[in-house]
Every structure is written in C-alpha cells, then in structure tokens.
Image (tube, grey):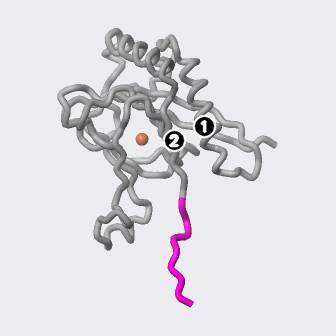
Amino acid sequence: MENIFQPFPTFIYQNLIEEKVYTFIKKDINNFINNNRSEITTIPGWICNTKSTFSKKDINSKLLNINNLKKSIHFHIENYFKVWSFKQDLDYRIDDIWLNIAKKDEYQEEHNHFDNLFSGVIYIQTPPNSGNFEFINPLTAQAILMKNSNSFPFARSIKPIESMIMLFPSWMSHRVLPNNSLQDRISISFNIRAEYIN
Ligand SMILES: [Fe+2]
C-alpha cells in the first residue's frame, strides 16, 4: 500500500485587531517614539540594526491604551488556543511587549523565542515593500535539499498588514526581510508564558 503523508502540522494564527484599539495604540506609539527616542536602540545580541525597546519593560506604562491592547491580545490568544486542545487548562500571561522600528535597509535576522510557549507580533506601520515576515521551514535538513517551491518552501513569507496580529509557537524560527521603503516599518512583539493549572 503506497501512502505518502505529511505527519506533523502546526498552527499559526492571523487576524486583525479591532480598528479602534489599533488607532489608539498607533497614536500612543507615535507619541512614545517622539518622546523617548533614546529608549529605542539596537539590542546587544541581535545581529541586525533594527531598533527596539526589547527588555525595557517600562514601555508599557508609557502607552495610554496598553490595557485595551492587552485585552485585545488576550481575546486573540483565547481564539488561537481553541485549536491546540491542551490536556489541562493553561494559566498564561503576556510576558513582555516591545516595539521594533526598522528604517530603510534594516531587517531582523533569523531567530526564535525558545524560552517561551507562544509569541506574537502586531503590525503598526507597514508601508509597501517594508519587509515581509518569514517563518523558516523547521525541516531544515530537507529544505536545503529541495527546490524552494510552494509545496516545500525554505520559508513561508507573510506580507505584513497594518493592524494584523499573528501568533505562533515560540520555537518557530523567523526573520524579517529588509525594509525597502523610505518610511519606517513599525511593529510590536510579545511573548506568552504559560503553566498548567493544577
Ligand atoms: Fe521574533
């Protein structure tokens, strides 16, 4: 009996955050950028020039609408978790939220967020050609042998859309291609930590 199948899929979540939440948080972020430029820097350990507030936890307190944003993120996490069928209920929290700004030609190298369970991104400003997000095929050993095709890609490229939220397992390697636009590409990222409820 000949049988060829692909045994191990995973789940990625995409949706748009509510327009009102997006509009307010975008305004907060623009204010934050204008008033806190020195807080947005290159990050030691990142092999790229993208500027970020990564690990500066005080950014949250400077965004007026952070609670509405978190409420929205929680709503989408709950939606995403429906497909996972966890064996026990999870107690989870959004661990950090940080801001990323890529100017022309800036990009983010391949990396993962391995010490978390899930990670996410929300696109705040993505002018045309400001760099696709790419998930790297985890079957690297096969990917390097195969033609880069739709059925077996080296990476899955995702065109960012303003107000789009994307959630994914933290182990999934990803990267951001160079920003070819003259305008900044702005996104926020976050990690989700979780434990089983006993
Ligand atoms: Fe990342």
> Is residue 51 at least partly visible in the picture?
no
The quarter of the picture showing ligand 1: top left
With 80 as the anchor, is 104 left or right in this view?
Answer: left
Local crowd at mark 2 within 10 Å, few (<14), some, or many (≥20)?
many
In 3D space, how far apart are the residues under numbered discs 2 and 1 (Cα atoms)?
8 Å
Residue furthest out toward the bottom: 1
Query: How many numbered marks are there?
Result: 2
Instruction: Identify the residue shown where x is 50% and y is 29%.
Output: 17
Give the residue number, with chain letter if any, for mark 1.
77
Above or below: residue 175 compared with residue 187: below
Secondary structure beneath label 1: helix
Pointer 1 residue Cβ closer than 8 Å to ligand 1: no
Callout 2: SS: strand
Mark 1 Cα shell of 10 Å, populated few (<14), some (14-19), many (≥20) = some
Quarter occupied by residue 161: top left
Q: Is residue 49 left or right of 158 when viewed as pictured?
A: left
79 left or right, relative to 148: right
Which quadrant, please, contains the C terminus?
top right
- Amino acid carrying mark 1 in the image: Ile
Identified at 57% across, 26% down, the residue is: 72
The question of residue 21 being in magenta is answered with no
Horizontally, residue 157 falls left or right of residue 5, namely: left
Q: Is there any visible trace of residue 113 in the rendered image?
A: yes
Instruction: Give amino acid for label 2.
Output: Leu
Choose between 99 and 133: the one closer to the eye. Answer: 133
Query: Is the residue indicated by label 2 positioned so its CB lies within 8 Å of ligand 1?
Result: no
Relative to 144, is 117 above or below? above
Task: Report the quarter where the N terminus lies.
Answer: bottom right
Magenta: main secondary structure:
loop
In percent of width and height, residue 185 lies at 29, 30
Figure check: 11 above or below 120: below
- Magenta part of the chain: 1-9
